[in-house]
Amino acid sequence: MLTRRSLATLAGAAVLALTSAFPALAEPIVIKFSHVVAPDTPKGKGAQKFKELAEQYTNGAVVVEVYPNSQLYKDKEELEALQLGAVQMLAPSLAKFGPLGVQQFELFDLPFLMNGYDDLRKITDGEIGKGLLAKLDDKGIKGLAYWDNGFKVFSANSPVVSPDDFLGLKMRIQSSKILEAQMQALGAVPQVMAFSEVYQALQTGVVDGTENPPSNMYTQKMHEVQKHATLSNHGYLGYAVIVNKAFWDGLDPAVRDQLDKAMAEATVYANSIAKEENDNALKAMMDAGTTEWHELTDDERAAFVEVLKPVHEQMADRIGADLIQQVYTALGTTN
Ligand code: LMR
């Protein structure tokens, strides 16, 4: 029979076995994980989960320092910092890979492409998702996983119920040419801006409106400075978790295995909470009562689809007509 003492000895032996699988390190390996959103979001919580699991599975040989809310770097700078090795890990929005020269990720920005998370999985979990991550290798970056956020709502200080309502509105976008084309199709004036600057830009009227999944809108308090919002679900916003490739390849394989395991579990976790986080954020904003929310009727939705669907063909050269076709095939749609 196992006594309390023999159990303790066994546990100690297990820890020792795990530790001895790793090189003896005087100092822990530090992974700086920088991101631009609040801790209380799908990405913020995913990063925290990865930290906990990575430190646990490596028995402290790896320490993950999470820097949320653009504390270290804003959108564009964080990608440069990753390539320079100033930080090791990021999870940028898929809309932000254009400046790196991997603009194919912008396919996720195509308006009215997906009907919910099941469609998303058909892209991220299949060959297309794998192929996109592999394109990062040449840039000194390794793609590890896709993390979900959610489907976007339009917001502004005037009603945004029909495409005509966007005429002349200055709309903040992420740095994606697809999103630029989308806003132009609506007659709006797109303005690329770092995420950390959006609240103030909305508050001071530098821009009139924007688009976000509810979790981002709520945690940045944008609903306090946007009088109107439309539940348009016109597009998706999510992430690729990426690491500096030289750093990752240079890790001891035993350490890397444990980090892979931590990442796989953190990914399952992050993707399991994303929808609920967005649903809760939406409810909290509705309860706050600072924004008037509009739910599209079928006809109103059809009017947006008619104006925005042509963006797919218009941007085929940028993403690749073949790739777009592969996406349609994976989704079982014709366009
Ligand atoms: C944005 O800039 O709106 C988003 O990409 C922020 C984020 O990381 O979710």
Image (cartoon, helix red, strand yellow):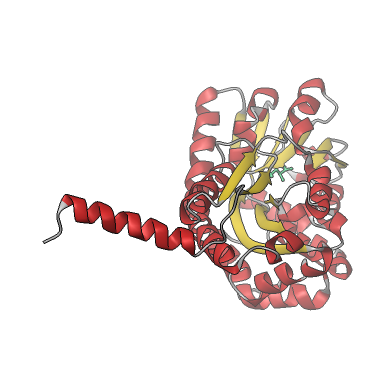
Write down the quadrant of residue 153 in the picture: top right
Residue at 65% across, 53% down: 238
Tell me the quarter of the image containing the N terminus. bottom left
Q: 314 left or right of 324?
A: right
Question: Residue 31 location, x and y as percent?
Answer: 65, 49
Question: Residue 317 location, x and y as percent?
Answer: 88, 70
Of the pair 281 and 43, the residue shown nearer to us: 43
Write down the quadrant of residue 122 in the picture: bottom right
Question: Residue 167 location, x and y as percent?
Answer: 85, 39
Residue at 52% across, 53% down: 54
Question: Residue 83 location, x and y as percent?
Answer: 82, 54
- The answer to whether residue 90 is above or below residue 128 is above
Of the pair 133 and 276, the residue shown nearer to us: 133
Q: 45 left or right of 162?
A: left
Residue at 61% across, 74% down: 126
Residue at 74% across, 57% down: 109
Q: Is residue 43 visible?
A: no
Q: Is residue 271 visible?
A: yes
Write down the quadrant of residue 243 in the picture: bottom right
Of the pair 51 and 254, the residue shown nearer to us: 254
Indicate which quadrant contains ligand 1: top right
- The answer to whether residue 78 is above or below residue 129 is above
Of the pair 159 and 76, the residue shown nearer to us: 76
